[in-house]
Every structure is written in structure tokens, then in C-alpha cells.
Amino acid sequence: MKKITIAIDGFSSTGKSTLAKQLANHLGYVFVDTGAMYRAVTLFAMQHGYMSADFFDKKSLVNSLPFIKLVFKFNADLGYGEMYLNDVNVETEIRKIEVSHFVSKVAEVSEVRSKLVEQQQEMGKDKGIVMDGRDIGTVVFPDAELKIFMTSSPVTRAQRRYDELIAKGDVITFEEVIENVVERDYIDSHRKDSPLVMADDAIEIDNSHLDREEQFQLVLDLVNECTKSL
Ligand code: DC
């Protein structure tokens, strides 16, 4: 069957990566979580003292971009690629709330975006890819055959992220998580460069009342329809 490009965009914690992973495993496609790339650049900035609560040395981060190597290495046990920053596995660290607090600031920087978008386009040049993020259907792959835009209520999303973080052993309150989710959505949707907007030809899925399996089946039907018509 002909391979297509599947772009999944949407607000934070809408389950984009979960759906993208499920689809990629089922279809034998490559899965790319672009949020992990923005998170890894943020971790680099934090490790080098380029950012803290009230401080962001954008210039130093931009100058360091040539020295930031991002690679997804496939982990057969997990069934997806883990993020490596300069050859170190940072998969756990990049999911922590400290990184979530700073990542939207880093994602506003145009030089960071161009570097990551270029790498993402290269990864998808042979199609057969499911990529999730905020600008996949609008900027990275505007010609993707299937574009999904995921939404759900902020409370549902914060609850999902909270449960995930607690399960990983993080010490955090629900209020802290919902505040972060709402703040990131605001910054992501209002930034100048590649804001989070739904592509005109995207299909919106509100999964507030769908379970994982229902959502997967719904999107799989869309994939089948799309590949049939090629
Ligand atoms: O999907 P996530 O929550 O892990 O993404 C982390 C942040 O990265 C998110 O707040 C916005 C940013 N991001 C982006 O600007 N563009 C993308 N394609 C993916 C993520």
C-alpha cells in the first residue's frame, strides 16, 4: 500500500503522541514526537545556564545550535525512538515539569524552529511517517495527506498529564499542572513564528469523551479512506 504522511497537531496533553505511536506501530510507519526535540533543546539551555526563572540568554542558545545534536534511537522494548541529546538519553529528563515550564520560550525562537523543522522534513522525506507537534500540518508538512488536529478540555488534559507525572514519581500538585498546560497553550497559540493553529484541511478530533481505542479506530478509518483514494 502507498505510504502517506500523517500530521498530528493540537494542544498540549491531548494524547497526540499516544495516538501517533499507536498508528505508527500498526502501519509500520516511523513515529516522531517533535515536542521531544523542543524539550531537548530546552534541556540543553538549562544545562548550560542559558535559562532560569527570570532569565533567558537567547543569543547564547542560538550560537550553540550547531553543537546540539538530536537523534531518536529506536528502543525495541518500548516500541518507539527515545530522544538523545548529544549522545545522551534524555527521554526521562525532558518530560519533567521544569522543562515544561521553559519549553514554550525556547519554541518561540525562530532560529530554533528553522533548525528543527529542517531536521523534521528530512526525517519525513520518504513518507510513511506519523509526526506530532504544533506546526506539522501547517509548516513542516503542509502537503501531508492526512492532518489531524486534537483537542480536549483543559481539565481533562491536565488530569492526564498529572496522572502521568505522578506515576513517574514526580512531586507535583494538580494546580501546578493545569497552570502549566493553560500557559503553554496560550504561548504556543500566540507566538509570532508558526503559532499553533489548525490547518484549513485538518480534521478536528475532540477526545474529551473518547477512550484510546475509540480514537485509534476513528483515525485508522481516516487513514484507510485516505490511502484508498490515492
Ligand atoms: O508536545 P509537547 O508538550 O511535548 O511539546 C513541548 C512544547 O514544544 C510545546 O509547549 C510547544 C513546543 N512545540 C512546538 O512549538 N512545535 C512543535 N512542533 C512541537 C512542540
Image (tube, helix red, strand yellow):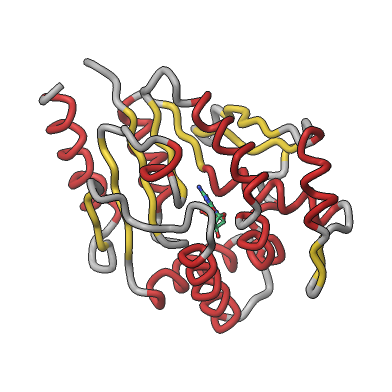
Residue displayed at 65% across by 59% down: 103
**Quarter of the figure that contains the C terminus:** top left
Image position of 31 (left or right of 220):
right
Q: Nearer the viewer, residue 217 or 58?
A: 58
Quadrant hosting residue 10? bottom left
Picture coordinates of residue 95 (x, y %)?
63, 56
Q: Quadrant of residue 118?
A: top right
Relative side of 172 to 31, left or right: right
Which residue is pictured at 60% across the width and 39% down the height? 114
Q: Position of residue 198 (x, y in %)?
A: 32, 55
Which residue is painted at 51% across and 78% down in the image?
Answer: 178
The correct choice, above or below, for 108 with respect to 101 in the image is above
Q: Residue furthest toward the bottom? A: 175
Which residue is depicted at the point 45% across and 62% down? Answer: 13
The quadrant in which the N terminus is found is: top left
147 above or below 126? below
Q: Quadrant of residue 2?
A: top left
Q: Is residue 109 left or right of residue 1?
A: right
Q: Position of residue 132 (x, y in %)?
A: 43, 44
| Residue at the outermost front position | 192
User: Residue 105: x, y in percent?
Assistant: 66, 62
Q: Is residue 219 visible?
A: yes
Work out which residue is located at the far right of the displayed protein and give it.
49
